[in-house]
Image: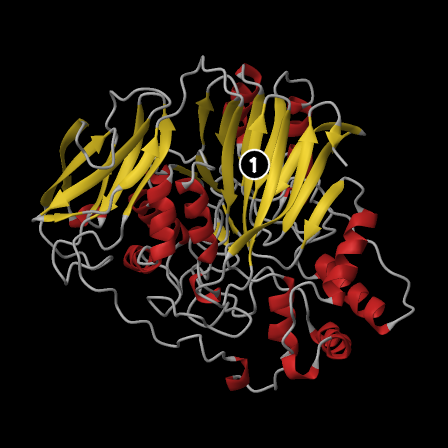
Amino acid sequence: MSKNLPRRRFLTGSAAVAAGAAISQAVPAQAQLSSSSSALSSARLPKESAPAPYAAFMHGVASGDPIPNSVIIWTRVTVSPDAVPGSGVGADVDVRWEIATDREFTNVVRSGTQRASANTDHTVKVDPNGLHPGTNYFFRFHFNGQTSPVGATHTAPAFEADLEQYNLAIASCANYECGYFSAYRGMAERAEAGDIDLVVFLGDYIYEYPTGEYAGKSGVSRPHHPAHEITTLTDYRTRYGRYRTDENLQRAHAAAPWVVVWDDHESANDSWDGGAENHTEGAEGTWDVRESAAHQAYFEWLPVRGVRPSEGGHIYRSYRFGKLIQLTMMDLRTYRDKQEKVFSPGIDAADRSMLGSEQFTWLKGQVESAVTAWNVLGNSVMVSPMEIGHLPPTSSQNRTANQVLDDFTHSAGLAVNTDQWDGYRSERACLFELLKDTKPHTLFVTGDIHSEWAHSVQHNGREIGAEMVCTSITAPNVDEIVTTYTKTYTPEDNPITHLVEGVMYSANPWVNHVDFDSHGFGIARVRKDRVIMDFFRVSNVEDPAAPTRHAVSRTWVAGQGFQA
């Protein structure tokens, strides 16, 4: 099991020293921190987190995977104070559910009861059916005289619906210890205002690390539970329970339906078909058992349809939204070959796969049969290639930026990352070949990399689509990792970050936008001939009251590319 800073590290050794020196020249003295760990702890970041007060529905409600006549509704019932997530205790109980067309529930259109038991961690998922397409609904649950919060959701539009626009919130990478989930509050506010039709979450909903191993700029904002690295079903259930006590996350789930897919941290860092970078076979059990436990907890705690892989099912799936969008969610973890080293001679082997043969065949069928205006591909790791350039070594800041870029290449950092599609180039070429002549426009929506990107997707010199990449909800990016290594408080939009961003633009002409320092989410506004990606940013993830604001937009038009 790796005990180093996780995969998204990027400064080591002399690069860290040089970065600290360069940043010291650029950051006011009062903003710099001492090298002691205590100085890296903000007074507003608590080191203890009190248990949430007992209530039957203390983990909120959620909905997801909408189709024209139904949408999954979800809750967890805490049947007694000791029946906490992962405890395995508590009686089997019946939970009553209701769906109405109004928030006051004067017009209940569907209702029933669902059994909750310790076998599923007392989570409840209902697929009500019999609903109307493209319709707003409200839902709630009842148990033992208590009523859950009310959730708002809606069904997918009818297949024949001629939509002018559909708004997809795009999010990923929420590390509980790295800051507060203010981005979820901002997302909820926009959903409640009618600005979001669907939330597409692209992985790293939780993180598996022990407390303190992967913290934020000022250390641990609020500790994980359990405090150790999670490896068992009990552990994963407990970690989900801790996350779902967050009020902002609950509010975001209650405000709109979600379609989700896992990446690696829902199980372990850099996972693949036979293991993970952050898994030690034997000492941490077998990978098959650990992965199965992670998948089981995921299916229990998220409003997803289907059956987990260990029971013969899969998480990859496709949904349609009128004549406008076919949304295809790919599983880029469960079936992939092991990651190769950068520059390994085997990296371009024709048989290397990220999707696995069965999923690729399924994906091919989905893409070729699509009759919508858009093929939107839910993609947990970046599909566009990354190339590295360098600045002339004429200043200390340029030299520091070059060291950062070298470490991108040689230490599996943010770019040239063989855990991304850059490590599976032969299969990526096959996928692009499949997409290049399809009638629907192609849009990849992507997470994982803790930074904002907008790409023109190129194949053999021809533009075949666009890729929009959201940043993280809280998980660290460049300014935070520089702070961790140098013990110098590094603000967002610092000179080193700007230099590195400039190099990425010059070395990768298909990159239309990149920002390495922000946290937040995106909204992809999909119209018949274009997609407008609005990037929303949180001002400070260490401040629980931090607002979220619109920062920048990028527009890609089919047949024309990005607009000036």
Residue 485 in sight in this render: yes
* Badge 1 amino acid: Ala
Q: Is residue 332 above or below residue 409?
A: above
Where is residue 418? Give x, y as percent.
Answer: 65, 49
Q: Is residue 119 above or below residue 526?
A: below
Q: Is residue 559 above or below residue 534?
A: above
Q: Residue lying furthest top in this view?
A: 160
Where is residue 32? Give x, y as percent.
Answer: 65, 81
Q: Residue at x 69, y 44 (%)?
A: 347
Q: Residue at x 44, y 66 (%)?
A: 177
Residue 330 in sight in this render: no
Q: Residue at x 48, y 65 (%)?
A: 178
- At mark 1, the secondary structure is strand
Where is residue 262? Give x, y as percent.
Answer: 45, 44
Instruction: Please count the marks in the image.
Output: 1
Horizontal placement of 14 versus 272: left or right?
A: right
561 vs 405, nearest the viewer:
561
15 vs 176, nearest the viewer:
176
Where is residue 255? Give x, y as percent.
Answer: 36, 42
User: Which residue, given by chain and number where applicable, does mark 1 sit on?
Assistant: 524
Horizontal placement of 211 versus 338: left or right?
A: left
Disc 1 residue crowd, few under 14, some 14–19, many 20+, Cα 10 Å: many
Q: Residue at x 26, y 30 (%)?
A: 127
Horizontal placement of 451 versus 228: left or right?
A: right
| Quadrant location, the C terminus | top right
